[in-house]
Amino acid sequence: MSTLVPPLFAGFMDDASVLPPGVVSVPDAVDAHRKHQAAWYAPMMGTLLVPASLAAFEVAPRGLATGIVNDGPIGALPTAVSKLRASGAVVGQVEALVARRGEDPQPGLAALREFAAGDQDLQVYAEIPLSWGLLAALDTLADQRAGGSPVRPKFRVGGLAAELFPTPVELAAVICACRDRDLPFKLAAGLRHALRHTDPETGFTHHGFLNVLVASALAAEGAEVADVAEALAATHPVPLVEPARSRREHPRPLCVGFGTSNVLEPLTELVRLGLVNGGYE
């Protein structure tokens, strides 16, 4: 076996098995993540994501690249980071919701910027709702990053209600808005499969992570919203696999990655689509 993960997919998946709706215990998640890091697909792995409220672990992720997802006030983040680092974890990432849908994101962005300024070793993501105040929030992040702030946007593209799933056009507009502001972004929720699909149990249509990857590459190359939306709307692999294959040896643009509760599911789909070779020469 060998680590034959193309640059396009390097660090693409964060391990979110501890986060809701996951039911994996912290000790089991830490053990599983160590196995992922020792596997042939390790270069595809990002960080082990943990909620801030569980920063003091019964079984610490000692030596593991770990990210904190805030499930409380932003003011509690410094304590959570300190506790986790004291356990021996390598904390290099923090993600925090800055507002609920319909709320002004600006106060949360200001608080997160203040937190990030106190720890230059962290990559910080501001989770911004896809609702009122979004574009102004992206403008604020762009201005802050121009001044040296490490904060980047994160968007939730799924959930337990239909309105939490943006349409292809809506998400394409967000991707292009990030492109225009030179803002790399992360995604969360709903990206379980490579291709856009409708869940037979809920009836919700989920975005595919391969759709997002190709759409982001097109946006980075200057595509208009309509063309980016077309890639996001594809439900068949044909219009997506070759554009991804042709870009495999290049770093991934715009989309930093996404969190998944089961890293083997997206990995298996990429192998089946012929975009990752399954660890064999």
Image (tube, rainbow, N blue to C red):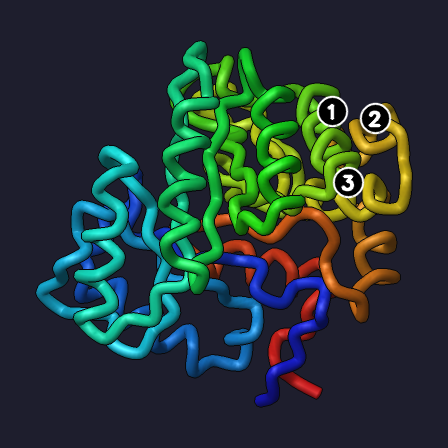
Position of residue 102 in the picture relative to residue 3 (left or right):
left
Instruction: Give coordinates of residue 109: x percent, y percent.
Output: 45, 31
Position of residue 170 in the picture relative to residue 24 (left or right):
right
Front position in the image: 219 or 31: 219
Which disc, if any, is residue 215? 3
Query: Label 1 amino acid?
Result: Ala
State if disc 1 and disc 2 touch (CB < 8 Å).
yes
The residue indicated by pointer 1 is 173
Q: Height in image: 94 above or below 12?
A: above
Q: Earlier in the sequence, mark 2 or mark 3?
A: 3
Name the residue located 47 percent from the left edge and 80 percent from the top edge: 39
Q: Nearer the viewer, mark 1 or mark 3?
A: 1
State if disc 3 and disc 2 touch (CB < 8 Å).
no
Name the residue located 68 percent from the left edge and 28 percent from the top edge: 174
Query: Label 3 amino acid?
Result: Ala
Instruction: Give coordinates of residue 64: x percent, y percent.
Output: 34, 73
Dot 2: what SS? helix
Q: Height in image: 106 above or below 44?
A: above
Residue reaching furthest to the front:
147
Instruction: Give coordinates of residue 76: x percent, y percent.
Output: 21, 42
Instruction: Give coordinates of residue 187: x percent, y percent.
Output: 54, 41
Name the residue located 73 percent from the left edge and 36 percent from the top edge: 181
Q: Earlier in the sequence, mark 2 or mark 1?
A: 1
User: In the rendered view of the protein, which quadrant contains the N terminus?
Assistant: bottom right
Query: Toward which corner of the image does residue 103 lie, by quadrant?
Result: top left
Q: Earlier in the sequence, mark 1 or mark 3?
A: 1
Position of residue 16 in the picture relative to residue 156 (left or right):
left
Which disc, if any, is residue 225? 2
Count residues near mark 3 (Cα–Cα under 10 Å), then give few for <14, some for 14-19, many for 20+. many
Dot 1: what SS? helix
Count residues near mark 2 (Cα–Cα under 10 Å), then give few for <14, some for 14-19, many for 20+. many
Position of residue 105 in the picture relative to residue 30 (left or right):
right
